[in-house]
Amino acid sequence: MRLVIADCSVSYSGRLNAHLPLARRLLMVKADGAVLVHSDGGSYKPLNWMSPPASMRVTDPDAEQAEAGISEVWTVSAEKSDDELKILISEIHHDSSHELGTDPGLVKDGVEADLQRLLAEQIERLGEGHSLIRREHPTPIGPVDILAKGPGGTVAVELKRRGDIDGVEQLTRYLELLNRDPLLAPVEGVFAAQQIKPQARTLATDRGIRCVVLDYTEMKGEESGNPTLF
Protein backbone atom coordinates (compact mmCIF):
# COMPACT_ATOMS: atom_id res chain seq x y z
CA MET A 1 0.00 0.00 0.00
CA ARG A 2 1.23 3.47 -0.89
CA LEU A 3 0.34 6.38 1.43
CA VAL A 4 0.72 9.93 0.12
CA ILE A 5 -0.13 13.15 1.95
CA ALA A 6 -0.39 15.91 -0.62
CA ASP A 7 -1.97 19.23 -1.48
CA CYS A 8 -4.26 18.27 -4.34
CA SER A 9 -7.53 18.79 -6.16
CA VAL A 10 -9.63 15.85 -7.34
CA SER A 11 -12.17 15.39 -10.13
CA TYR A 12 -14.33 12.33 -10.83
CA SER A 13 -16.10 11.84 -14.17
CA GLY A 14 -18.25 9.01 -15.49
CA ARG A 15 -21.60 7.86 -14.11
CA LEU A 16 -21.43 10.95 -11.91
CA ASN A 17 -19.28 14.06 -11.83
CA ALA A 18 -17.72 15.41 -8.63
CA HIS A 19 -14.94 17.83 -7.73
CA LEU A 20 -12.82 18.45 -4.63
CA PRO A 21 -10.98 21.80 -4.58
CA LEU A 22 -7.35 22.17 -3.57
CA ALA A 23 -6.65 20.97 -0.01
CA ARG A 24 -4.28 18.71 1.91
CA ARG A 25 -5.44 15.10 1.79
CA LEU A 26 -4.36 11.49 2.31
CA LEU A 27 -4.16 9.43 -0.89
CA MET A 28 -4.19 5.63 -0.56
CA VAL A 29 -3.09 3.47 -3.49
CA LYS A 30 -3.81 -0.20 -2.79
CA ALA A 31 -2.24 -3.25 -4.36
CA ASP A 32 -5.59 -4.30 -5.88
CA GLY A 33 -5.72 -1.05 -7.90
CA ALA A 34 -8.09 0.88 -5.65
CA VAL A 35 -7.32 4.57 -5.07
CA LEU A 36 -8.96 6.39 -2.16
CA VAL A 37 -8.94 10.08 -1.22
CA HIS A 38 -9.32 10.83 2.50
CA SER A 39 -9.59 13.95 4.61
CA ASP A 40 -8.82 14.26 8.32
CA GLY A 41 -12.47 13.72 9.24
CA GLY A 42 -15.59 11.86 8.20
CA SER A 43 -14.59 8.63 9.94
CA TYR A 44 -13.34 5.87 7.60
CA LYS A 45 -15.28 6.88 4.46
CA PRO A 46 -13.17 8.39 1.66
CA LEU A 47 -14.17 11.67 0.04
CA ASN A 48 -13.83 9.99 -3.34
CA TRP A 49 -12.36 6.78 -4.69
CA MET A 50 -11.94 4.44 -7.64
CA SER A 51 -12.73 0.80 -7.01
CA PRO A 52 -10.72 -1.99 -8.65
CA PRO A 53 -10.11 -3.15 -11.31
CA ALA A 54 -8.46 0.11 -12.30
CA SER A 55 -5.17 1.41 -13.64
CA MET A 56 -3.26 4.57 -12.72
CA ARG A 57 -1.01 6.76 -14.88
CA VAL A 58 1.25 9.47 -13.44
CA THR A 59 2.13 12.21 -15.92
CA ASP A 60 3.71 15.64 -15.97
CA PRO A 61 1.35 18.62 -15.96
CA ASP A 62 0.65 20.54 -19.15
CA ALA A 63 1.79 24.15 -19.46
CA GLU A 64 -1.41 25.61 -18.00
CA GLN A 65 -1.40 23.16 -15.05
CA ALA A 66 2.29 23.81 -14.37
CA GLU A 67 1.64 27.54 -14.30
CA ALA A 68 -1.10 26.88 -11.71
CA GLY A 69 1.43 25.08 -9.48
CA ILE A 70 0.60 21.47 -10.38
CA SER A 71 3.64 19.17 -10.12
CA GLU A 72 2.13 15.88 -11.35
CA VAL A 73 -1.17 14.44 -12.54
CA TRP A 74 -2.63 11.08 -11.47
CA THR A 75 -5.22 9.63 -13.83
CA VAL A 76 -7.03 6.57 -12.46
CA SER A 77 -9.22 4.78 -15.03
CA ALA A 78 -11.76 2.03 -14.36
CA GLU A 79 -11.22 -1.04 -16.55
CA LYS A 80 -14.91 -1.92 -16.98
CA SER A 81 -16.39 1.56 -17.51
CA ASP A 82 -15.50 5.08 -18.63
CA ASP A 83 -15.20 6.32 -15.04
CA GLU A 84 -12.07 8.36 -14.35
CA LEU A 85 -10.54 9.84 -11.21
CA LYS A 86 -8.06 12.66 -11.83
CA ILE A 87 -5.84 13.94 -9.02
CA LEU A 88 -3.81 17.11 -9.56
CA ILE A 89 -0.88 17.16 -7.13
CA SER A 90 0.50 20.53 -6.07
CA GLU A 91 2.89 19.43 -3.33
CA ILE A 92 3.70 16.08 -1.69
CA HIS A 93 4.43 16.18 2.06
CA HIS A 94 4.77 12.43 2.67
CA ASP A 95 5.14 9.41 0.40
CA SER A 96 5.66 5.88 1.70
CA SER A 97 4.93 2.31 0.61
CA HIS A 98 4.23 -0.67 2.88
CA GLU A 99 3.82 -4.41 2.32
CA LEU A 100 0.80 -5.52 4.36
CA GLY A 101 0.80 -9.16 3.31
CA THR A 102 -2.27 -11.36 2.97
CA ASP A 103 -5.17 -10.40 5.20
CA PRO A 104 -6.97 -13.32 6.90
CA GLY A 105 -10.30 -11.54 6.49
CA LEU A 106 -13.00 -10.55 8.93
CA VAL A 107 -13.92 -13.18 11.50
CA LYS A 108 -17.55 -12.78 12.51
CA ASP A 109 -18.74 -13.54 16.00
CA GLY A 110 -20.97 -16.52 16.61
CA VAL A 111 -24.30 -14.75 16.36
CA GLU A 112 -23.52 -13.02 13.05
CA ALA A 113 -22.20 -16.27 11.58
CA ASP A 114 -25.32 -18.12 12.73
CA LEU A 115 -27.57 -15.37 11.34
CA GLN A 116 -25.87 -15.69 7.98
CA ARG A 117 -26.27 -19.48 7.94
CA LEU A 118 -29.90 -19.36 9.06
CA LEU A 119 -30.89 -16.64 6.60
CA ALA A 120 -29.21 -18.56 3.77
CA GLU A 121 -31.29 -21.59 4.73
CA GLN A 122 -34.43 -19.45 5.14
CA ILE A 123 -33.87 -17.04 2.27
CA GLU A 124 -37.63 -16.65 1.78
CA ARG A 125 -37.52 -14.29 4.76
CA LEU A 126 -36.34 -11.66 2.29
CA GLY A 127 -39.68 -12.02 0.52
CA GLU A 128 -41.45 -14.26 -1.95
CA GLY A 129 -39.47 -15.20 -5.03
CA HIS A 130 -35.98 -15.03 -3.49
CA SER A 131 -33.39 -17.77 -3.92
CA LEU A 132 -29.84 -18.11 -2.61
CA ILE A 133 -26.90 -17.61 -4.98
CA ARG A 134 -24.10 -17.96 -2.41
CA ARG A 135 -22.81 -16.94 1.00
CA GLU A 136 -19.66 -14.81 1.42
CA HIS A 137 -19.64 -13.59 -2.18
CA PRO A 138 -16.09 -12.28 -2.76
CA THR A 139 -15.37 -8.72 -3.89
CA PRO A 140 -12.09 -6.77 -3.98
CA ILE A 141 -13.18 -4.84 -0.87
CA GLY A 142 -14.45 -7.77 1.18
CA PRO A 143 -17.09 -10.52 1.07
CA VAL A 144 -20.80 -9.77 0.76
CA ASP A 145 -22.59 -11.79 3.45
CA ILE A 146 -25.30 -13.19 1.17
CA LEU A 147 -25.92 -12.85 -2.56
CA ALA A 148 -29.41 -13.83 -3.65
CA LYS A 149 -31.72 -13.68 -6.63
CA GLY A 150 -34.92 -11.69 -6.20
CA PRO A 151 -37.90 -10.86 -8.41
CA GLY A 152 -36.18 -7.66 -9.58
CA GLY A 153 -32.64 -8.98 -9.99
CA THR A 154 -29.63 -9.61 -7.75
CA VAL A 155 -29.85 -8.91 -4.01
CA ALA A 156 -26.85 -8.19 -1.78
CA VAL A 157 -27.44 -8.70 1.95
CA GLU A 158 -25.32 -7.24 4.75
CA LEU A 159 -25.96 -8.89 8.14
CA LYS A 160 -25.36 -7.40 11.58
CA ARG A 161 -26.46 -8.15 15.12
CA ARG A 162 -27.11 -4.46 15.67
CA GLY A 163 -27.48 -2.41 12.54
CA ASP A 164 -25.96 1.07 12.63
CA ILE A 165 -24.83 3.66 10.09
CA ASP A 166 -21.44 1.97 9.59
CA GLY A 167 -23.18 -1.16 8.32
CA VAL A 168 -25.24 0.87 5.83
CA GLU A 169 -22.07 2.58 4.60
CA GLN A 170 -20.40 -0.83 4.19
CA LEU A 171 -23.31 -2.15 2.13
CA THR A 172 -23.34 1.05 0.05
CA ARG A 173 -19.72 0.42 -0.97
CA TYR A 174 -20.53 -3.17 -1.93
CA LEU A 175 -23.51 -2.04 -4.02
CA GLU A 176 -21.46 0.63 -5.78
CA LEU A 177 -18.96 -2.03 -6.81
CA LEU A 178 -21.43 -4.84 -7.63
CA ASN A 179 -23.58 -2.60 -9.81
CA ARG A 180 -20.56 -2.08 -12.07
CA ASP A 181 -20.66 -5.79 -12.97
CA PRO A 182 -22.99 -6.25 -15.96
CA LEU A 183 -23.51 -9.89 -15.00
CA LEU A 184 -25.00 -8.88 -11.63
CA ALA A 185 -26.58 -5.45 -12.18
CA PRO A 186 -29.05 -4.26 -11.13
CA VAL A 187 -28.22 -5.15 -7.52
CA GLU A 188 -30.63 -4.31 -4.69
CA GLY A 189 -29.36 -3.84 -1.16
CA VAL A 190 -30.87 -5.43 1.95
CA PHE A 191 -29.63 -4.45 5.41
CA ALA A 192 -30.59 -7.22 7.85
CA ALA A 193 -30.08 -7.21 11.62
CA GLN A 194 -31.67 -8.16 14.91
CA GLN A 195 -31.95 -4.46 15.72
CA ILE A 196 -31.63 -1.48 13.37
CA LYS A 197 -30.98 1.97 14.78
CA PRO A 198 -33.34 4.72 13.58
CA GLN A 199 -30.48 6.71 12.01
CA ALA A 200 -29.33 3.64 10.10
CA ARG A 201 -32.85 2.95 8.82
CA THR A 202 -33.22 6.55 7.70
CA LEU A 203 -29.91 6.46 5.82
CA ALA A 204 -30.72 3.08 4.25
CA THR A 205 -34.13 4.29 3.07
CA ASP A 206 -32.57 7.41 1.59
CA ARG A 207 -30.17 5.22 -0.42
CA GLY A 208 -32.84 2.80 -1.62
CA ILE A 209 -31.70 0.01 0.69
CA ARG A 210 -34.38 -2.23 2.20
CA CYS A 211 -34.20 -3.05 5.92
CA VAL A 212 -35.12 -6.45 7.38
CA VAL A 213 -35.30 -7.06 11.14
CA LEU A 214 -34.57 -10.70 12.00
CA ASP A 215 -35.74 -12.60 15.07
CA TYR A 216 -32.74 -14.82 15.82
CA THR A 217 -34.57 -16.92 18.41
CA GLU A 218 -37.48 -17.61 16.08
CA MET A 219 -35.12 -18.44 13.18
CA LYS A 220 -33.52 -21.11 15.37
CA GLY A 221 -36.95 -22.70 15.78
CA GLU A 222 -37.65 -21.42 19.27
CA GLU A 223 -40.86 -19.60 20.22
CA SER A 224 -40.73 -15.88 19.52
CA GLY A 225 -42.21 -13.21 17.29
CA ASN A 226 -41.94 -12.94 13.55
CA PRO A 227 -39.33 -10.91 11.65
CA THR A 228 -40.48 -7.47 10.57
CA LEU A 229 -39.95 -6.10 7.09
CA PHE A 230 -39.55 -2.34 6.48
Image: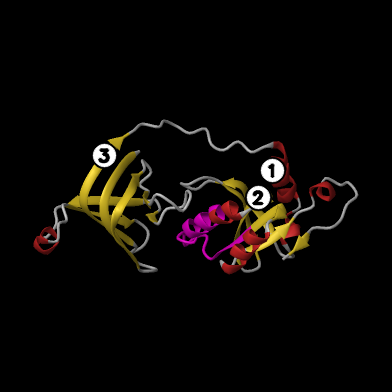
Q: Tell me if residue 80 is in the magenta stretch.
A: no
Can you name the residue that lies furthest to the right here?
Answer: 223
Pick the residue in front: 180 or 133: 180
Q: Do the residues labelled 3 and 1 touch (CB within 8 Å)?
A: no
Is residue 172 shown in magenta? yes
Element carrying mark 2: strand
Residue occupying image coordinates x 71% and y 64%: 129
Amino acid type of the residue that numbered disc 1 sits on in the rendered structure: Glu
Task: Give the residue at mark 3.
Answer: 95
Q: Looking at the picture, which amino acid does disc 3 mark?
A: Asp
- Disc 3 versus disc 2: nearer the observer: 3
The magenta-colored residue range is 170-190
Residue 89 placed where, x, y %? 22, 53
In the displayed structure image, the side of residue 33 where residue 157 appears, left or right: right
Q: Is residue 194 left or right of residue 96?
A: right
The residues bearing labels 1 and 2 have C-alpha atoms spaced at a distance of: 7 Å
- Residue beneath label 2, please? 159
Q: Which amino acid does label 2 sit on?
A: Leu
> Which sits earlier in the primary sequence, circle 3 or circle 1?
3
Determine whether the residue tagged by mark 3 lies in a helix, strand or loop: strand
Q: CB of mark 1 within 8 Å of CB of mark 2? A: yes
Answer above or below: position of 194 versus 30: below
Place of residue 167 in the rendered image (x, y in percent of width and height, measured from the top left): 59, 52
Residue 52 rendering spot, x and y as whole percentages: 39, 51
The N terminus lies in quadrant: top left
Specify the label residue 112 is tagged with: 1
